[in-house]
Structures are given as C-alpha cells and as structure tokens.
Image: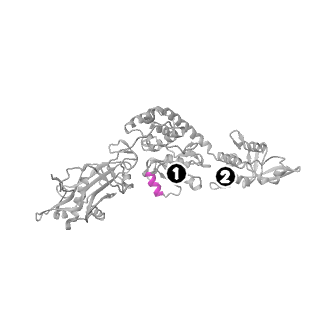
Amino acid sequence: MARKVGLFTVRGDDEEPDEKYIIPDSDIDLEDNYVNEQVYDNNYNDISYHQPIINNEFIIDEIEKDIIKQTILPQIWIDETGTICYTLNTPDIYNTRQLPLLNVYGYQTYLYSSEYKKSKQILIVKCIIISSNTKNAICIIFNYDKKIKGKDFIQTLIASGITLLSAGRYRNNLADALLSYSINHAEKLEIPYSYGWWKKSDLKWKFAGKNDLTIKYIQENKTDQIKTEIPCENSYDINDYTSNEQKFLILISLAVNYPVLKEYGMELSKPLFVVVDKGQMKAAIDILADRDTSKLHSSIKKRELVKIMTETNSDFVVYPYIQSKKSDEFLSVINDIVLAGEIDGNKINAMPVIISENFPYGYDMENFFTVCIEGSLDDIYINKIAVVPPDEDLVIVKDKIDNEIASSFSHNEKALMAAVYFLYPNFKHEIVNYQTLAIKLIEENDNNYDANSLEYFFIEELFNWQKKTGFHNISQLPYPANNALENMKNTIFFDEDYVYMHENIFKEITKKFENIISINRLKKKLDDEGILYKENTNTYTVKMCYYKNEILNRNRMLRFYRSKLYKGETGFIEACQYIEAYQ
C-alpha cells in the first residue's frame, strides 16, 4: 500500500524485519534532544521537520525555488524484494518511470541519539550489496557535527561500494529524496553516549551498564555485529566484604555515582589520593580501574587531558603517582580541575584518583582527600555495579542524603556519607558498618594532613635508613671515643639536647629526596619546622665542640634537636644504642 509523505510516495515498507542488527562504527555526540524527520512541504519550497527526538544535524539543504520549478518529483519506496526504488514524475512531459535506485536490498536505517552531557546523534545505513553474483553486507555510519547534504550522503554510499544504478541529471534531487527517506524511516532510539549514569529526554537518571548499547560502544566495535538492543547485566554477588574491600566499595561509589552526586551537590571537591603498601600499586589500579578506565601521566598533552576529563563518565580517571618535581606539578593541575569542576569550560563527570605507594614528601595534602589501604590487595575484586542502586531506588537514596547527613559535616564529609547511601539499596543490612567506616576514613584523612609534613618524612627516612643499614656508630659528647674521632664523617654524635651528623651521612639518609627538592632547600624546610638548628645560614651547620686529649676542638656539623628525632616512643639515639648493645 503506497502512502504519500510530503513530496515522496513510500511503498512496500509495511512489514518490520524480524531482527535488526547494526555493525557499529564511530563515535558521535548529540547537541539537542530532537530528531528532525525531513520532508519537503506541500509548496515544494522548503524542508519541514517533524517528530522531535534528535536535533537537526542531518539537514537536507533547502532546494532553491528556481531549481524546484524545474525538478522532476522523486518518489522513493522499497519493493517486495527489498530493493530500494524510485519513480520520476516529470511535470513538463508527464511520464512516470519506476526504476531501482541502488544495487542493494535489505536497506535499513537506524537513528540513535544521546542528549546527556553533549548532544550527539548517529545515522546508520545497513544493507546488502549485490555485485557480480556476490552479496556483501555493509554498514555505513554517518557521524556529522554539521549539516549533511543529499549529495554528500549519496557520495558516501558510493564510496562504500554501493552503485547508483540510474539518475542522470536528476541525481541531486534523488540524493535529497533518499536522505529524507532514510531519516523518515529509520528505527529511532535514544541511547546513552557511554557507560554510567545519564539522563534521557524525560530528565530522569538512568544507568547504562557495560552491556548496554551506547554510542561509544558503536564507535569502538566497528566490525562486530550486535543487536540494536542489548539487555543490561547488573547481577553481582554480595559477599561478606573485608575492611579493605568495604573501603574500595565506598571509593568506587564516589566515582561511579559521581554525576548524580554532583547534581545533588554532594560530589567530592578534592581529588582522591589513595596510599597503598609498597608493591601494591598495580593491584590497587586493577581494583579501581578496568580496561575502559583512562590513565593519566604527568607529560599528557592538554588536548588529551581535556578529552579524557570531559568524556569519561561515572568512572575514575587514574593517575599512578611516583614522586618527582614534574609529578608534583601535575598534582596541582589535577587539584585545580576538581576544585573548578570543569576543564577548558567543559564540565567533568569523572573523578580523578591518585594512587601512590607513599605520601608526597612535603606536599600540601590538604588539597586532597587521602585514604590509606594497608596489606596485600592481590585477591580483591570489586564488581562496580554493586555500588549502583536500581534507577527506581534513587528517590530512597536522595531521601537518605537529605535527612540523615549531619549539617555540621564539611562538604567532603557529606560527599563520603552520600556515597555510602548509594550503597543502601544493595547493602541495607550492612549500611551501619559502611557509615562507621566512612567516619573512620574522614578521621584518618584529617590525621594524614599532620603526617604529611616534611618533618614526618625525614623522620621516616631516618629510621628506615637506620634499620636498613643497622647503623649504630654513635658517640657521646663532650668526650667522644677516639675511634669515632678518627671516622667523624661516618659517626653521629650526641649530647642531652642535640644530635650532630656530617653532611655525608645527611645526604645518604635523604637520598630519596634528591629528585624532589634540593639539599639546601630541604635543610631550610627542616630548619623552618624546628628540626635542624642552624648557626651558619649558608651551610646550615654549627661548630660542634668536643675534647680530644683534654684539648677543646671544634668541627662543623649539622645539628638536630634530639627531642624531634623520635618515631612513636623510640628516639633515634636510643634505637642505635639498642643495636649497639646486641652487637
């Protein structure tokens, strides 16, 4: 049964195919939430737009009036064999011709759209080419951020191996008609751009799982054949999680639920800094990231950084951190991005996480939310979908956030508790444990600020060096042992108030700092923090007084307050004496 659509007569398309497949090809964005079906109006002068679903990126250029007057009126349809055909009705010599237009059958089109973040859309043409007794199934992706003309559309088809069987001087008109037909009769579907939380045109939050059809999936699977609709696999096991696994669940909730937390005003406003034990960085990255997770490095180009931070959705952006001057500079870049909530004028929907095996020496950690996770992480696996509440339970989560988070909490404390409440629908029987753990993480974060001073790191390195080397070459003033005086560069001297060491020993202890801070700047910072007691402002040394053969001598040394060289209840001199006693 033929039907008239504007200028076109469409026939033979009443039956829907049993199965619809696409071969995904490339990435696209949507500007608005509208699909413009385009047909010529009754005056044959302009293009009309109907059924708002996606925006008007696919626009057939207006046909100028003087051309329209001379036009042969094309009508497009698919016949009973699945061949796309056309009819030309000439106004000057009324003569109707019905001809196949393309050497294809099974011509189908799909129009996918996504509005969330950046509006994007994609038009897909699928058909089977008939050529020299062979049949080849192809799929062509039309991905334009600008208007597409009928002639460009037909040229792309031809470049893909399709033959235009006839048209002659009416080719441009037929191209416009075919493009319009392809859009009018496309199977239309609003889909997410990528994995994670997104909003449909009804402004309701939906979560796209890893198996859901997304525009990004179409981009990255150019040769795979997939159905137009894929069920989402949201199944997971709720186990008895260990303390470390519970910590990871809260952190993952902060990242996966970031878009919704951000809309609620409950996103973490500081980058997340996760400190793990030595040798556990890779395991931590494997837990927080998957194959689709982007990773940063300090030499990344700004264009790539902008792309990663603006296109990543509901996920971490991981920065494996090994301290250097350049790495510390990049930490400041990350902090600025999170504080602003955008980069280059574009909003971010992902949360950076820095993973390190130690705190940055001397870096101001108040700019980060720090979490320490101790022990082996090799056997930990967290299914990220476990932190995602069902769409219909978001109202419960929002009610918990609005009514149960203390107003006295800081913004970042509220963010951590809000991330916990996203676990409520799936972990309601264990939610008290997660609330308690969140409070503990908040308290530990506050303590980490104090632990991050250069004093802390110097003391850590001093005791680590002493333990590693078994150092115990110490001698008490004012009457040091003769063998100590013969080897002063490798001996540490002390009295009741001070500890003295040669520059050589100091450099050996602070070797880890050399790529981060100059030796003189390090001395100045230790002086500022009240550890080093200087006398000479150029070298930060003092004249250490001692007796040798009843004669008073002086030798320049670095002098430290003995009371500052403690780790817990143990002093450095006492630790050396303990080793010396058991030698």
Residues 543 and 232: in front is 232
Q: Residue at x 41, y 38 (%)?
A: 389
Disc 1 packing (10 Å; few <14; some 14–19; many ≥20):
many
Q: At which x and y percent is residue 279?
A: 59, 49
Disc 2 packing (10 Å; few <14; some 14–19; many ≥20):
some
Q: Dominant secondary structure of the magenta stretch?
A: helix
Q: At which x and y percent is residue 400?
A: 44, 33
Q: Amino acid at mark 2?
A: Leu
Q: Is label 1 in a helix, a strand or a loop?
A: strand
Quarter of the picture holding the C terminus: top right
Q: Is label 2 in a helix, a strand or a loop?
A: helix
Which region of the structure is painted magenta?
Answer: 302-310
First in sequence: mark 2 or mark 1? 1
Q: Which of the two marks, 2 or 1, is nearer to us in this view?
A: 1
How does the figure colour the protein chain or chains? one colour
Q: Amino acid at mark 1?
A: Tyr
Residue 75 falls in image quadrant: bottom left
Q: Which residue is mark 1?
A: 319
Query: Does the rendering let one see residue 147?
Result: no
Q: Which residue is mark 2?
A: 522
Asked whether residue 306 is drawn in magenta, I would say yes
* Vertical placement of residue 142 versus 391, above or below: below
Q: At which x and y percent is residue 97?
A: 14, 63
